[in-house]
Image (cartoon, coloured by chain):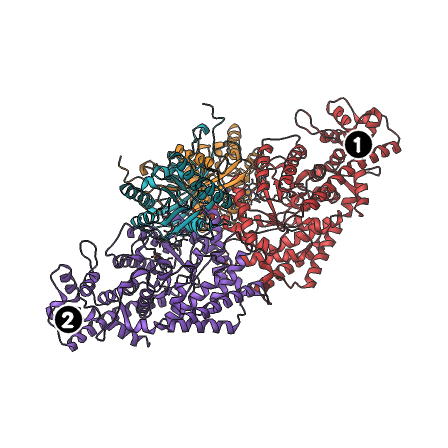
Chain colours: A cyan, B orange, C purple, D red
Amino acid sequence: MSKKNMIRPYGDTSGDGKMQLSFCLPVPPDAWGKEAARLLLKNIGYDEIEICGVRDLREGYTHFIAYAVTPAFVDPSNIKVKVVETPVMDMEATDAYIQDNIGREITVVGACIESDAHTVGIDAIMNMKGYNHRYGLERYQGFNAINLGAQVPSEELLRRAREANADVILVSQVVTQKNIHIKNLTRLIELAEAEQLRDKMLFICGGPRISHELAIELGYDAGFGTGTYSTDVASYIAITLAGRIVKG
Amino acid sequence: MSKKNMIRPYGDTSGDGKMQLSFCLPVPPDAWGKEAARLLLKNIGYDEIEICGVRDLREGYTHFIAYAVTPAFVDPSNIKVKVVETPVMDMEATDAYIQDNIGREITVVGACIESDAHTVGIDAIMNMKGYNHRYGLERYQGFNAINLGAQVPSEELLRRAREANADVILVSQVVTQKNIHIKNLTRLIELAEAEQLRDKMLFICGGPRISHELAIELGYDAGFGTGTYSTDVASYIAITLAGRIVKG
Amino acid sequence: MLKLSLADAAKQRARDAAARIAGSFAWLFDEYTSLTIERTVLRLMGIDGALKDGKPLPNVVVDQLRAQQALARGAAIPVANAMLAKNISAQSVADSVGHGELDLSELPKAAPDEIFKILDTLSDQMLAHIAKQRSTREQMFAQYGPRRVPAIYVIVATGNIYEDVVQARAAASEGADIIAVIRSTAQSLLDYVPFGATTVGFGGTYATQENFRIMRVALDEISEQEQRYISLTNYASGLCMPEISAMGAIERLDLLLNDAMYGILFRDINPRRTLLDQYFSRMINAYAGIEIQTGEDNYLTTSDAVEKAYTVTASQLLNEQFALLSGIKPEKMGLGHAHEIDPELPNSFSYELAHALLTRELFPEAPVKYMPPTKFASGNIFKTHLMDAMFNFIGQLTGQGVQLLGMMTEAIHTPHLADRSLAIENAQYIFKAVQDLDASLSLAPDSWVNQRANQVLNEAAEFLEGVAAEGLFAAMARGEFADIKRPETGGKGLDGVFRKDEGYFNPFLNKLTKELGL
Amino acid sequence: MLKLSLADAAKQRARDAAARIAGSFAWLFDEYTSLTIERTVLRLMGIDGALKDGKPLPNVVVDQLRAQQALARGAAIPVANAMLAKNISAQSVADSVGHGELDLSELPKAAPDEIFKILDTLSDQMLAHIAKQRSTREQMFAQYGPRRVPAIYVIVATGNIYEDVVQARAAASEGADIIAVIRSTAQSLLDYVPFGATTVGFGGTYATQENFRIMRVALDEISEQEQRYISLTNYASGLCMPEISAMGAIERLDLLLNDAMYGILFRDINPRRTLLDQYFSRMINAYAGIEIQTGEDNYLTTSDAVEKAYTVTASQLLNEQFALLSGIKPEKMGLGHAHEIDPELPNSFSYELAHALLTRELFPEAPVKYMPPTKFASGNIFKTHLMDAMFNFIGQLTGQGVQLLGMMTEAIHTPHLADRSLAIENAQYIFKAVQDLDASLSLAPDSWVNQRANQVLNEAAEFLEGVAAEGLFAAMARGEFADIKRPETGGKGLDGVFRKDEGYFNPFLNKLTKELGL
Ligand code: B12
Ligand code: B12
Ligand SMILES: Cc1ncc(COP(=O)(O)O)c(C=O)c1O
Ligand SMILES: Cc1ncc(COP(=O)(O)O)c(C=O)c1O
C-alpha cells in the first residue's frame, strides 16, 4: 500500500511524522533516566527521539519533554465516524417543525445523575437563558422542559420521567475519573430496561467526554460532547421523534 | 517477564502509563479529523485515547492535544548509558593535577565549525569569564586556550591546531536542522584522519544536541551537551591526557 | 503601589448590611443543635472507629440516642452517664453500643455533678490537645519562618491516600506551601465521615481522620527536610462541617474550606442545617487556629464573572460576619474569590485586577484565597497554562494570601504529577518576575480599574441591603444567590436539625464560647 | 498611562554623540563603492538570472569588469555601453557575458550622452516600478486598514519555499500581520544572492528574488481573503545588503532586517564594507517605503541583558542616525530590542518594562521591533511558552510596533506549524487581556522602573560619547561593541570595497539622493 495518501503527522515537512510528547517516569533526572525515557519512546516505536526537557519532579520521578518521529500513519479509508446526522435548525425552525410534524409539545426531563453535580452543561442545553446566544429548551414553544438539576439518583430520574409522560430523557455526566460516567450511564439504561421505559423514550446523554459513538455503545439513542448547543439537541429530538411517529 | 519492576509512565497511579501528546495532521478540525487523530494514536499502540484539544491550523491542518495510555515499558536492565566517567575537579584542582601529572601546559584549539556561528556555547567553555561562575579554560594555568570563534572551516581549524601543536581540539555544533551537525562533525574527523592528525590529539565536540554516545559514534573521544561546564571538560582532558602519557 | 480609592460610605453600607444579616440568626445558633454537632461532641470526647459495614461509631451512638428520643439534651450527657455507670472510657461506651451490647437509655442516671465533672475533664483534655497542636504549628512557623505571600497552594486528588502522599511530598519539595487533599465527589452529601485510610475515591480522596493523619505525618517530614512548614488543608463543608473541623483540629490541619453558605447553594443542603453547623464548626476552627477558606469561586464557575462579580463581594462580607460571630480573627479568614473571566473578553486582565484589588482592600488583614481559572480552562493545555500565568501575575501583583494554583489540565483530569509540577513552575516564575512590580506602579486617578472596583462594591452594597431587608432565607428561597432557589425547609439534612431542650449540654460549645470571648 | 520621566539632557547627549559618529563617514559614503553596490545597480537595470553552476549574472558581469580593472567607474556605464554597441537589453548583455560571448572591455565606446540617456531611461523605469510597488502597498493599507500595534510578526523557516508558503498562509489566516522568511544559515557570508526557487536550506530558506515573489503572491492572496494586508520581510544584511534591498523593493517586501553594524559585529564582515553597503541599501529601502528593522537583539543573545542593556540603546541611536543619512523617516525605523533577561532574575518583568519603555520613549515615532526570549528558552516548552507570554504582555502594555513572536520550541527546532499557531494564540490572548491596561496605570514617581530606564540611558550616553571621541572603527577594534574585536581592515569582504574614480556613475545613487532630498 502506497504511503502517499496516508495521513501522517506534520511538523514542517509533509509527512515528517513529528510529534511532541511529555510524560513522567519513576527514574532519576540524570543520564540514566534520560536513556530510560529514550528507550520508552523507542519501545513505543518512535524514531529520531529528542529528549529536550528533563525536569526533576522529586521523590524519584522525572518529567520528560520530547519530540520524536512516528512511522505510524492512518489510512483515510479506515476512518469511520458515527455522528448525529440530523440537520441543525434554529429555534424558530425547530418550533415550526414540531408544530408541523408532531403537533404537540415534546416533554423532556433532564438531570445530572448520581454523584455528578456539574449542572452547567445540562443547563446550557435546557435553561431559558441557554449558552452562547442560543436559548435553551425551556424557551422553545415546542418543548416542555423539566430540569431536575444535580445529583439526581437514576431511580428518581426515571420516576419523574414516567410521571411526566416524558418523550425524552437527557442525562449529563461530567466527572469521568475511573470511568464513573460509564458505570452511571450503564446503570440508568439497565434500570430503564427493567422498568420497560427504554423504548418509550429517547435516551440522550451528554458531557465533555461523551461522543455519539460512545452513547450508541452504551445503549443510548444519541450522545453530545463539548461544544453542543441546544439547537443541536432540539433539532435531533424533533426530527427523530417525527420519524418515529411516522413509522410507529 | 514480570511487569512489576518495569519502568512505566506515571500520571497519578503507579504504572498507569499516561502520556501527553500533541501533533498536527493534514485533516479538517471536525469529527472525521478527530477520528483520524484517534486512529493514529491507536496505530502507534496507545490505549484510552483522549483527544482533548482540537485546534484549527487553517490550510487543511489541525492540531491535536491528547492524553493516552501506553502499554510500553522499559526493562531497567536494558538501560546502558555511555557517559564521560572521569571525576569533575574544580579549576584549582585541575591545575594542580596537570602540574603533577603532565608537567606542562595543555594546548587546546576550539571553534564553531563550518556554517555554525553559535559561539556562546564554546565561549562558555573556553573564555576567561566562563559561565555560571565557572571560569573558562583561558583562566586555567594549565591550559593554553586558543578560541577561533565562529564559522571556522574544518580545514582551517586543523591547520591552526597543527601549527599550535595542539593536544586537544574542541568543536561546537549548535545548528542541527537536517542533521547538518552530523555531516560537519563527520567531515572534520575524516579530514583529520586523512591528515593523520586524528591520533595526535583529543577530539572533543559539544552542543545542545550532542551526547557522549553520539560523539563516540562519530569517532570523537568525548562529547558534551547542554549544561556542560568548563570544569567538566577541563577535568576530562587533564585526566585522559595524563592516562595517555602514562600509557604512551 | 497599586491602591484603589474605594468609597468609604459604600464599604460601610455593605458591611453593615452583612452584619445585620449574620446577626439575625441568634435564634438558630442558641436554640438548635444537629446530628453532626452531636457527633462532633462525641468525637471530641474521644470516640472514633466504625462498624464493620463502615458506619462510624459517633453515628451509631447518636442514632441510638435519636431513636430513643434522647438527643435533645445533647449526646454528651448520656455518654458520660454510661461511662460512669460502666466505669469505662467514652470509646468503650461507643464500642459497646456498636456491638449492640449497650442501650444508653437503660442505664441508671448518675449524679449531674459527676457527669459534669467527667465531661469537664474530657473536654479539658481534648482542648489541651488541640491547643498543643495549635502551638506546635505556631512554633514551626516561628522556627521555619512565615508562609510566602501569596502562598503556593496545590491540590492532590488521586483518590488513593498513598498516591496522594507521593504527589504531596513531591509538590512540597518543589515549593508548595499548602497541600489540599481534594475530597471524593459528593462526600459533602454523606451524613457521616468515612473511617480509616482509603484508596478509592472519585475525583478526590475521602476526608477521614486517618487520611488526615497519614498526610500530616508525611508533610511534617517534608517540612523538616525543606525547613519550611508545609500546611495541610481539607474540606469542612457539607453535612459534617463541625466533625471535620474537629478532626482537623485533632490532626493539625492548618486550613479548612469552610463556607457559611456553600452547602446551601451548591450542595442543596438545608439552609438551617448549614448555618447552624458552620457556627459550631468555625468555633472549633477558631480555637484550633485553623485558617478558614470560603468558596466564593463557586458563584463564578456557575455564573458570569463580570455580571455577578458583586455576588463574590457580598458573600465575602457575609462570610466575614458569620466568622466573627464564631470568634475567627480576620487574619484567619481566607475569604475567596476567583479568576474566572472569559479569556475572550477584552481587558480580562484589567477586570481581574479590579476585582482582586477590591477583595484585598476590603479585607486588608485576611489571607485572601485566590482561585484559578477553571471554567474557561479547555483541553488546550497550552492556553490554560497561559491563563494560569495571568492569574499568578495578578496574585503576586495584588498580594493575595493564598494562590490556589491552576493546572493546565484543569479541563481534562485531576492533576497528574507533572501537571502540578508545571503549575508550581509557572507560579514561581511569574511570582519572581513581578516580585516588586507593585511598588513601581500606581493607579491613575479616575482609571477604569478603580471605577470598576467601585461599581462592584456598590452593587454588592445594594444587594446586601436588599437581602438584609428581606431576610437571608427569604432571599435564598427567591434564588437571589447564584440564581438557585433554596427554600428554608428544603434540601438535605433538615431532619438532622432539632431544638435543644433545657437540659441540653455541650461542654465544648460552652468552653469554646468562653475561650473565644464570644 | 505608563510614562517615564527621562532626563532631557541625557537624551540630547546620547543623540548628539550618535549623530557625530554617523556623520563622520562622509569620506566612505562619497568616495567608495563595493561589489554588491555595483551588482545592485545591474539588478536595478534589469539584470537577473544565473549560470548553470548557480553563479548569478550580476556577479558574472561585475566580476568580469573587476578582472579587467574596469569597475572604478561603476558597472552601469560599461553595461550601458554594451547595450548601445550591440543594441540589446541589459539582460542580454549579461546573458552574453555569462555565455562567454561578450567581453565588455573590447567594445567601442559610445558617446557619453547616449550612455547617460539610456541609463536615465532604465533607472526611471525601475524607480517607477518601485514607486508603484510602494503605492500598491499604501493603497492596500488604506483599503484594509493599518497594521495592529504591536503587529504580530512570525517567522517561517522550513528551508523549502513551498512548505514556507503553507506555513505562512496558515499563520496569516490565524492572525499574523507580518511573515518573515528566515534565511538559510550563513547566507550572510555569501558574496552573491542565490537564484530561483529553493527547497533546501538549513535553519531557513535562501533569500532569492524568486522566493520573494512566490511568497508575495501567496500573501497577497491571503491579504485579500482576510481583508488585512499581510506584510512580508526578509534580511538585508551580510555581504549583499543593497542587492537584497533592491530585490525587496522590486518584489514589494514591506520590511527588511537591515542593521548598520550587525554584519561587522555578528558576521565578521569588514567594517568599511558594511557601513558602505548599508548606506546605499537604506536609500533603496527609503525610496521603496520599506520599513527597516535593526538587530539590537543580537547584543543580548551574546551578552547579559541587564549589564549590557545600554548597548541596545547605543546601537538604536546609531542606527537611527545612519538611517537618517540614507533618508529613512522615523516612522520606517523599526529599531530593535529584545526580551532576553534571565527568567531566574527577580523582577525580570520590571527590568523589561523599563527597557521597553525607554525604547518607546526615545523613539516615539518608530515602529519599534521587539524580539522575544531566545537565550533562556529551554527544551521545557511549557516554561518557554510562559516567557513568551510575559514578553507579549510587555509588548502590548508599552505599545511596541512589531512583536516578533516567540515560539515555545525556540530551543529545539525551527518552528513547526503548531508551534507558530500556539505562539499566535499566546499573543492574541495576552494582547486582548491587557488591551487597555496601560491607560489605567501610571509609574510611581521615583519608581524603580523609572530609575532603571534613566540609568540605562545615562550609560548609553556615556558610552556613545566615548565612541565619538575615539572614533567608531577604533572603538570596534578595541572590542567596545558586544565584546568582539573587529579591526577596520579585518573581516570578510574588504576586497570588495574600492575607491570610485572621477568618472564613476551610479544612476540610482544620484536619483535616490535627489528623490530622498539628501
Ligand atoms: C464548573 C465546575 C465545577 C463546579 C460545578 C458547578 C455546576 N453547577 O455545574 C463545582 C465547583 C461545583 C465543581 C465541583 C467538582 N468538580 Co468540577 N469542574 C467544573 C469545571 C471547571 C467546568 C465544567 C463546566 O461547567 N463546563 C462548561 C459546560 C458548558 O461544558 P460541559 O459540561 O462540557 O457541557 C457541554 C457539553 O459537554 C454538552 N453537555 C453536557 N451535558 C450534557 C447533557 C446532554 C443531555 C446534552 C445533550 C449535552 C450535554 O453540552 C454542554 C454545552 O456545550 C470543570 C473543568 C473544565 N474547565 O471543564 C471541572 C471538572 C469537570 N470538575 C472535576 C471534579 C473532579 C469536580 C469535583 C469532583 C472535585 C471535588 N472532588 O470536589 C467536584 C464535585 C462535583 C460533583 N459532585 O460532581 C473534574 C472532573 C475530572 C474528571 N474528568 O473526572 C474537572 C474536569 C476538573 C479537574 N480537572 O479536576 N466543578
Ligand atoms: C544565541 C542564539 C543565536 C545567536 C548566536 C550568537 C552567538 N554569538 O553565539 C545568533 C542570533 C547569531 C543566532 C543566529 C542563528 N541561529 Co541561533 N540561537 C541562539 C539561541 C537563542 C541560544 C544558543 C545559546 O547561546 N545557548 C546558550 C549556550 C551556553 O548553550 P549551548 O550552545 O548549548 O552550549 C552549552 C553546551 O551545549 C556545551 N557546548 C556547546 N558547544 C560546545 C563545545 C564543546 C567543545 C564542549 C565541550 C561543550 C560545548 O557547553 C555549553 C555550556 O554549557 C538558540 C535557541 C536556544 N535557546 O537554545 C538559537 C538556535 C540554536 N539558533 C538556531 C538557528 C536556526 C539560527 C540561525 C541559523 C537562524 C537563521 N537562519 O538566521 C542563525 C544563524 C547562525 C549560524 N550561522 O549558526 C536554531 C537551531 C535549530 C536547530 N536545532 O538546528 C535555534 C535552536 C533557534 C531555533 N529554534 O530556531 N542564534
Ligand atoms: C467551600 C467548599 N467546600 C467544599 C468543596 C468541595 O466540594 P464537595 O462539596 O463535593 O466536597 C468546595 C469546592 O469547590 C468548596 O468551595
Ligand atoms: C540584522 C540581522 N540580519 C540578519 C540576521 C540573520 O542572520 P544571517 O546573518 O545568518 O542571515 C539577523 C538575525 O539575528 C539579524 O539580526
State whether residue C509 is above or below residue B40: below
Circles 1 and 2 on the same chain: no
| Residue at x-position 79% and y-position 44% | D30
Alpha carbon separation for disc pair 1 and 2: 121 Å
Q: Residues within 10 Å of mark 2 (few under 14, many from 20)?
A: many
User: In this figure, which residue is indicated by the disc labeled 2?
Assistant: C81
State whether residue D196 is above or below residue C359: above
**Residue C227 placement (x, y as % from top left):** 36, 61
Q: Nearer the viewer, residue D238 or C83?
A: C83
Q: Nearer the viewer, residue D431 or C429?
A: D431
Is residue A48 shown left or right of residue D130?
left
Kind of residue indicated by mark 1? Ala
Answer whether residue B140 is visible to the viewer in this image. no
Q: Indicate the quadrant where residue B149 lies.
A: top right
Kind of residue indicated by mark 2? Asn
Ligand 2 location (quadrant): top right
Q: Indicate the quadrant where residue B116 lies.
A: top right
Q: Nearer the viewer, residue A193 or C122?
A: A193
**Residue C168 placement (x, y as % from top left):** 34, 54
Residue D70, disc: 1
User: Which chain is disc 2 placed on?
Assistant: C
User: Which chain is disc 1 placed on?
Assistant: D
Residue at mark 1: C-beta within 8 A of ligand 4: no
Q: Secondary structure at mark 2?
A: helix
Q: Secondary structure at mark 1?
A: loop
Is residue C98 shown left or right of residue D414?
left
